[in-house]
Image (tube, grey):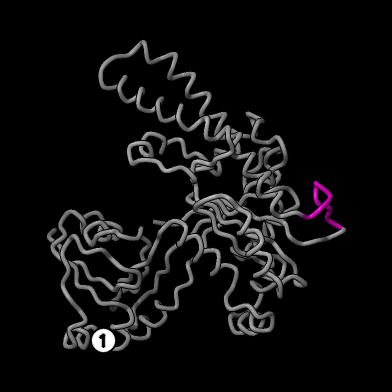
Amino acid sequence: MALTLGIIGLSKSGKTTVFNALTRSEAQTSAYANSGSEPNMAMVKVPDERLDTLAAIFSPKRVVQADVQYTDVAGLSKGAGKNESFSRQFLNYISKVDTLVHVVRAFSNADVPHPEETINPLRDVETLELEITFSDMAVMEKRITKLREGIAKIKGPEREVNERELAVLERLLPELEAGKPIRDLDLSEDEERAIRNFQFLTAKPMLVLLNIDESQLAESERLIAEVRAKLPFKNTEVAAIAGQIEMELTQLSDEDAAVFLSEYGLKQSGLNRVIGLSYKLLGLISFLTAGADECRAWTIRNNTNAQKAAGTIHSDLERGFIRAQVVSFDDLVAAGSLAEARKRGTLRSEGKTYLVKDGDVIEVLFNV
């Protein structure tokens, strides 16, 4: 499964600069809300040093990293969530993403004035949250009206399904009106299933990404802590990125980029931080497959059993699953080969109910 991230933000937040930094692109600021043009989109590889280590052990024909897709939509402004035509267009591009990356302006630049004239990250977070809440409310109200009008005309199982859906929506709408995003609510599995197809924006995990400048790098942790302490929302992470600097970083070789990061006191690139936090928000992990043909990373949800994980590779492996040969990445590296790991007893057989762990190196045995 490829992780999909939607980059959103208010106008003048620098989110397209962040998009370029994360994807090594040269995209221009999107203005599709007014012109009908497409948003900026790019697919990037998930950095994983473990694959390089496995490649050194197995000398495979190819190394395949997991994928992440970024979609950068036009900047929002106050009232956008209540604009039905804009809201519909916005939803068309952003509703199917797994996580929202909200780029929030924390830098000052007199040449690019903030629409609200002052820099206030917390205010901007709340403004955008309100706009996507309005968008969800509009979708919800329209569906509630349709269900109420149609339920009396149908009978049997279809009516029961619609009645359950209506009950969930009628419970959630007052919560939205009170300013509570769906991600903050404790939904049962049945309730989640009832609203899954709507892809409500406030139900999605959110990464608040403070866009800072060079002068703020030394105080980035303080800025992150201040915003995080005041955010009331669950399933929300806060991080900082120096968008302009990180965009310049993408133009350098890996060696020069490492020196660049060190000079600014950065332990890892913005791409690594954003992907890592997004995985954390969604409860995602990676398992690995390794051999002479290919070394590859596969993305699954935490607590996925071995049989389901096998289905990530191919549906035939899930259907015909017999068992999985499993060794942790660290144990494999320590052994130096699968044969030695087997001798040491660190390569073991696991059944279909085994819960795959991050970094497990797996070979699936199956019937065709």
- Residue at 58 percent across and 32 percent down: it is 177
Residue at 37% across, 15% down? 151
Left or right of residue 166, residue 367 in this image: left
Which residue bears the numbered disc 1? 337
Q: Position of residue 268 (x, y in %)?
A: 57, 75
Q: Nearer the viewer, residue 155 or 122?
A: 122
Quarter of the rendering containing residue 127: top right
Please identify the quadrant where the N terminus is shown: bottom left
Q: Which of 180 and 141 lies nearest the eye of the viewer? A: 180
Q: Is residue 5 left or right of residue 62?
A: right
Q: Is residue 114 magenta?
A: yes
- Residue lying at the far right in this picture: please name it: 110
Name which residue type carries label 1.
Answer: Ser
Instruction: Determine whether the residue tagged by mark 1 lies in a helix, strand or loop.
Output: loop
Mark 1: few/some/many CA within 10 Å (<14, 14-19, 20+): some
| Residue located farthest toward the top when viewing the structure as drawn | 153
The quarter of the picture where residue 35 lies is: top right
Left or right? Give the position of 23 relative to 367.
right
The residue at 56%/31% (across/down) is 137
Q: Is residue 79 left or right of residue 178?
A: right
Q: Quadrant of residue 110?
A: bottom right
Q: Position of residue 165 (x, y in %)?
A: 38, 28
User: Which residue: 58% across, 80% down?
Assistant: 254
SS assignment for the magenta stretch, majority? loop
In the rendered image, residue 307, in percent from the top left (x then y), is placed at 21, 59
309 versus 125 height, above or below: below
Which quadrant of the rendered structure holds the C terminus? bottom left
Q: Which residues are magenta?
A: 111-119
Q: Against 197, is 9 above or below?
A: below
Relative image position of residue 192 (x, y in whole percent): 38, 39
